[in-house]
Amino acid sequence: MKTRRTEGFRQATCCVIGCGPAGAMLGLMLAREGVDVLVLEKHADFLRDFRGDTIHPSTMEIMDELGLAEGLLDLEHTKAPRIEARLPGGTVTVADLSRLKTRYPYITFMPQWDFLDYVTREAKRYPNFRLEMQAEAKVLILEDGIVRGVRYETPEGPCEARALLTVAADGRSSPFREQAGLKMVRTSPPIDVLWFRLSRRDGDPKDTFGYAGGGRFMVVINRGEYWQIAYVIRKGEYQSVRDDGLTAFRKSVGDTIPDLADRTGELQDWDAVKLLSVQADRLRRWHKPGLLCIGDAAHAMSPVGGVGINLAIADAVAAANALAGPLGAGRVRSRDLAAVQLRRELPTRAIQAIQSVAQRRVVSSALGPDGAPSIPAPARALLSLRLVRDLPARIIAFGIWPEHVKRREPLARE
Ligand SMILES: Cc1cc2nc3c(=O)[nH]c(=O)nc-3n(C[C@H](O)[C@H](O)[C@H](O)COP(=O)(O)OP(=O)(O)OC[C@H]3O[C@@H](n4cnc5c(N)ncnc54)[C@H](O)[C@@H]3O)c2cc1C
């Protein structure tokens, strides 16, 4: 089936709703395998601050398999080979990726818009890839219980895209799950995160750190010219943090991160502070005939470990590996869609369980009244064993079940 375009009507083999990490990568990979793919993105560009900007070794290996790692690393980025925590009792290495056996033993920090610009630029080199910006999907086209495409809005007016398969990759608030009657399992993570940035100056430390003390926990990420800071609060505490005022907020940042106390005045108003309401959920069933959900649309992840973008991309790879053949053959069965869920659900649930334990520990320890987190003696003893010591780094780097690009003959690019 060729992508057909007439006024207000499109036809494609696969229509992907949303061009975030999951949708962009799926679009690229399907196009590379000769599938006619139409990606709809509601925004005019990819410029969104404080999104998943952490590219882990699992994703770098995928980019390498696609022949795109070098080009990606030509873009401006920073690397974090280690994650360390500065606790009142001293500095602890939480994860040392530099010891892992991979060509990319570090977390790559890059604005998500640069990553998406790069992936879509590469995808557009395939004649069968089509991306429509300012195209906001609204309603699934359902016929006899089968999803046949989606109706969407553009600045020129309403449109309809018909496809053999529609993929909802439109993030954590996807309305298409409900439209399709897919049920969610919701959990209530006990934390929210406030994101903001402060300048980096000569003589600042280089690494990415977690800081804890005085009942506060913050993660400080080196982004080259600035520090990106995650200020963790208890769920629902945002209003009281605001009521205490900006001066108290700046003081608490300076008290917890003494290295940056000299520049908290850069926070001039609350517009500089963005609230991430932490959400963790997953669909019971990721698909129905004609529809598949992937990425945050299938499972919103907590920001713990910065894995969201990497899991979304792993879903895209699993979906492309499993579905390029059936899409090419013009027939996608329920069991093809179920195979994607089967492959991705367990690793996702395992990571959500680990995040849940980590969040509870942050709340009971770092955000507790004494605010003096420490690593218990038995855990310290375990961490001195090499195999155990490398486990957090391995999980952060590769998750539970890393995906790899199936080696097929890709289509020639233009
Ligand atoms: C503030 C914040 C900080 C985060 N920090 C991290 C981090 O450090 N590391 C990490 O790994 N993860 C982080 N995450 C999570 C990470 O951003 C997501 O897990 C990841 O982006 C999920 O990718 P996705 O493609 O599934 O969905 P999204 O990135 O949400 O992409 C969905 C896309 O669909 C588009 N869209 C939505 N609705 C429609 C529609 N109706 N029609 C057309 N297009 C539509 C959206 O504009 C968007 O481009 C963070 C998230 C937030 C909100």
Image (cartoon, rainbow, N blue to C red):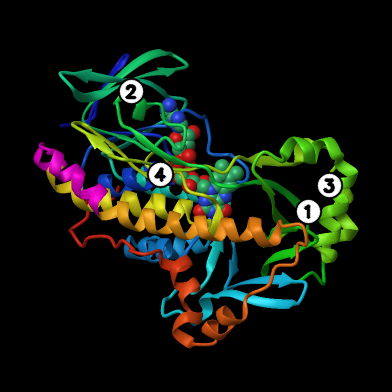
Q: x, y percentage for residue 117?
A: 49, 45
Nearest to N terminus: mark 4 or mark 2: 2
Q: CA distance from mark 1 to mark 2?
A: 42 Å
Secondary structure, mark 3, is helix
* Residue type for callout 2: Gln
* Residue type for callout 3: Phe
Q: Which residue is mark 1?
A: 198
Which residue lies at the image location 54% right of the left edge and 82% below the top edge? 383
Secondary structure, mark 1, is strand
* Residue type for callout 1: Leu
Q: Can see residue 187?
A: yes
Q: Which residue is mark 4?
A: 299
> Seen in the image, is 83 located left or right of residue 145?
right
Q: Can see residue 113?
A: no
Label drawn at residue 179: 2
Q: Which residue is mark 3?
A: 249
